Image (cartoon, rainbow, N blue to C red):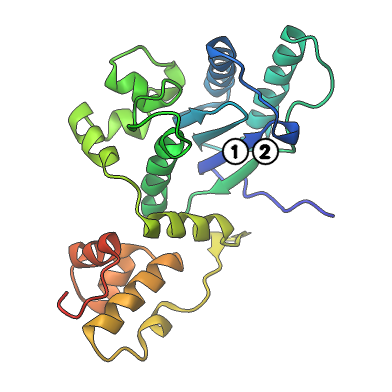
Amino acid sequence: MPTRPRIDLAGYHHVINRGINRDVVFNNSDDREMFLKIINKAAMIHNVILHDYCLMDNHYHILIETTKENIATFMRIVSANYSQYFNKRYKRSGHLWQDRYQSKYITSEEYLYALIRYIEYNPVEAGLTQNVGEYPYTLSSLIFKVKEHYPCTNESLLIKSFDIKSLSEFLEIPMSDIEHEYLEKKQKQKIKKSDDGIQISQSKALKEHFTTIQNKKERNRAIINAYLDGYTQISIAQYLKISKSLVSKVIKNGDITPGV
């Protein structure tokens, strides 16, 4: 089966990989620190920013920003160097990773910040900790504990766009079912390169989501459906000529009651 083409544009990428047969790839804190050291060294050479990460036992999530079309080179270095380290340390041979890494190109600011919440909530939803920021192998844990972080995270959105209080407020509300569904649909959304950058495949034009609405309940349901189809809250608000805060309230609450 042919491999799916990658979106190797400069910008934000969510990268995931697992151990072969879902085997453990991080046995302890030393392994995780080595992985971060390898990422840091490669990032400093290739001008990549590590915005967030979560290192579980048998897989990882990283959110990176590239400044040129070099994600394939960057990830090849990271994967190969960590595999070499792991095989040597544990006297094993053969493939470490289940497959080539998976990467998703981040197409909007809304997608980006929802993804940060998803990455940080991974350990909570896996039952490894009760509260976001407590699991030691996420960037937020270092920020909340005011611990030293790797230079490749100096420009991270978690550090640059938040102080500790606002970051805690941003992360402390559990992810809603709608947020999960939104991210699931974004992960499956088809994207391809074009002369202008990228083209995003949505199920229908934005106006088609609202052609048959007759009351606020139907409007609110259509807002949620348009959001799940990949349209941003701003674009929905502008189309409907309502405030973004109202759109946000509808989506946050999953609210389709007539009074909103």
| Percent coordinates x, y for residue 4 in the rendering | 73, 53
Among the two numbered marks 2 and 1 on one chain, the one whose residue lies closer to the N terminus:
1
Q: How many marks?
A: 2
Q: For the residue carrying disc 2, how many other residues have a C-alpha within 10 Å: few (<14), some (14-19), or many (20+)?
A: some
Q: For the residue carrying disc 1, how many other residues have a C-alpha within 10 Å: few (<14), some (14-19), or many (20+)?
A: some
The answer to which image quadrant residue 26 occupies is top right
- Mark 2, residue position: 101
| Residue 94 sits above or below residue 204 on the image | above
The circle drawn on residue 16 is 1
Give the CA separation, mark 2 to mark 1.
Answer: 6 Å
The answer to which image quadrant residue 166 occupies is top left
The answer to which image quadrant residue 255 occupies is bottom left
Q: Quadrant of the N terminus?
A: bottom right
The secondary structure type at the circle numbered 2 is loop
Amino acid on which the number 1 mark rests in the picture = Ile
Q: Can residue 70 be spotted in the picture?
A: no
| Percent coordinates x, y for residue 115 in the rendering | 43, 45
Residue nearest the observer in this picture, 250 or 80: 250
The secondary structure type at the circle numbered 1 is strand
| Residue 134 sits above or below residue 199 on the image | above
- The answer to the question of whether label 2 and label 1 lie on touching residues, with beta carbons closer than 8 A, is yes
| Residue 23 sits above or below residue 255 on the image | above
Residue at the spot 58% in from the left edge and 59% down from the top edge: 188
| Percent coordinates x, y for residue 134 in the rendering | 35, 24
Left or right: residue 229 compared with residue 83: left
Amino acid on which the number 2 mark rests in the picture = Tyr
Q: Quadrant of the C terminus?
A: bottom left
| Residue 60 sits above or below residue 7 on the image | above
Q: Can residue 163 be spotted in the picture?
A: yes
Residue at the spot 73% in from the left edge and 38% down from the top edge: 100
